[in-house]
């Protein structure tokens, strides 16, 4: 049976996540209100603008439902603004502090090949757009990839975050890893 994956669809590039997840054989439900979370096996928080997304989460009363979802141990993938959304200062789902726009104005956006722990098949093509990095993290957080010594991908239990945009670079392996986490959790 294909997993049912939720994609938070308040703001940002949620449609690109929907497309890649469907191409990989998942069923997708866009999440806009708390009731949409019922019955989903995993959740993506997309890139976009974390301030706007935070306002949407507050408006819809999604904060506690999203935290409960994560507490159940169901897999969650946060990309770019999604990494910011799960950090200590926002939803506090993951023991990290994300620094917004950390790469600075000069290098707003760039692409880079990354070595990613746990992903085989050669370097991963990563697109960074006003990306955060992980400035601090607790002991349970495993850093999976770095750019110039700055952590740009990490995992804590079933929460996976990347500060780049795998959904727009034609790079399926981050979503494949996420779908594997969902399968492992379901069985
Ligand atoms: N800079 C954005 C923020 O702070 C994140 C950028 C992105 O998601 N591409 O929310």
Image (cartoon, helix red, strand yellow):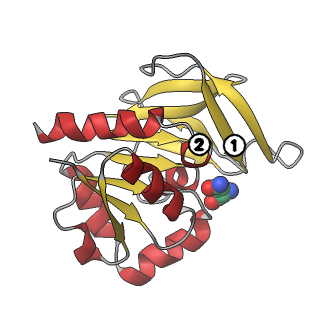
Q: Is residue 104 left or right of residue 140?
A: right
Tell me which label, 1 or 2, sits earlier in the chain. 1
Label 2 residue SS:
loop
Answer above or below: position of 155 versus 105.
above
Is 143 situated above or below 130? above
Task: Describe residue 36's horizontal placement relative to residue 79 as left or right.
Answer: left
Q: Which mark is residue 42?
A: none
Residue 184 rendering spot, x and y as whole percentages: 19, 33
Q: Is residue 170 above or below residue 90?
A: above
Q: Closest to the observer: 59 or 121?
A: 121
Q: Are marks 1 and 2 in contact (CB under 8 Å)?
A: yes
Q: Residues within 10 Å of mark 2 (few under 14, many from 20)?
A: many
Quadrant of the displayed image that contains ligand 1 = bottom right
* Quarter of the image where the C terminus is located: top left
Q: Answer with left or right where residue 85 lies relative to residue 109.
A: left
Q: Position of residue 125 (x, y in %)?
A: 64, 31
Alpha carbons under labels 1 and 2: distance apart: 7 Å
> Badge 1 is on which residue?
128
The answer to whether residue 158 shows anywhere in this view is no
Q: Residue at x 46, y 32 (%)?
A: 173
Q: Which residue position holds label 2?
A: 163
Can the viewer see residue 138?
Answer: yes
Q: Residues within 10 Å of mark 1 (few under 14, many from 20)?
A: many
Measured as percent of width and height from the top left, residue 172 is found at: 48, 37
Instruction: Name the residue at 34% across, 79% down.
Output: 61
User: Position of 15 compared to 175: left or right?
Assistant: right
């Amino acid at each position: 049976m294909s997993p049912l994956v939720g994609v938070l669809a308040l703001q940002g590039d949620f449609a690109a996540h929907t497309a890649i997840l469907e191409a990989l054989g998942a069923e997708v439900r866009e999440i806009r209100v708390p009731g949409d979370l019922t019955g989903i096996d995993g959740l993506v928080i997309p890139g976009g603008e974390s301030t706007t997304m935070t306002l949407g989460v507050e408006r819809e009363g999604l904060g506690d439902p999203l935290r409960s979802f994560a507490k159940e141990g169901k897999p969650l993938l946060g990309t770019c603004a999604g990494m910011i959304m799960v950090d200590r200062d926002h939803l506090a789902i993951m023991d990290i502090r994300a620094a917004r726009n950390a790469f600075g104005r000069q290098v707003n956006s760039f692409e880079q090949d990354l070595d990613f722990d746990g992903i085989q098949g050669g370097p991963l093509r990563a697109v960074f757009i006003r990306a955060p990095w992980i400035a601090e993290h607790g002991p349970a957080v495993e850093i999976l990839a770095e750019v110039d010594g700055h952590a740009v991908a990490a995992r804590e239990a079933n929460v996976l975050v990347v500060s780049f945009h795998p959904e727009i670079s034609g790079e399926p392996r981050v979503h494949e890893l996420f779908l594997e986490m969902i399968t492992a959790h379901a069985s």
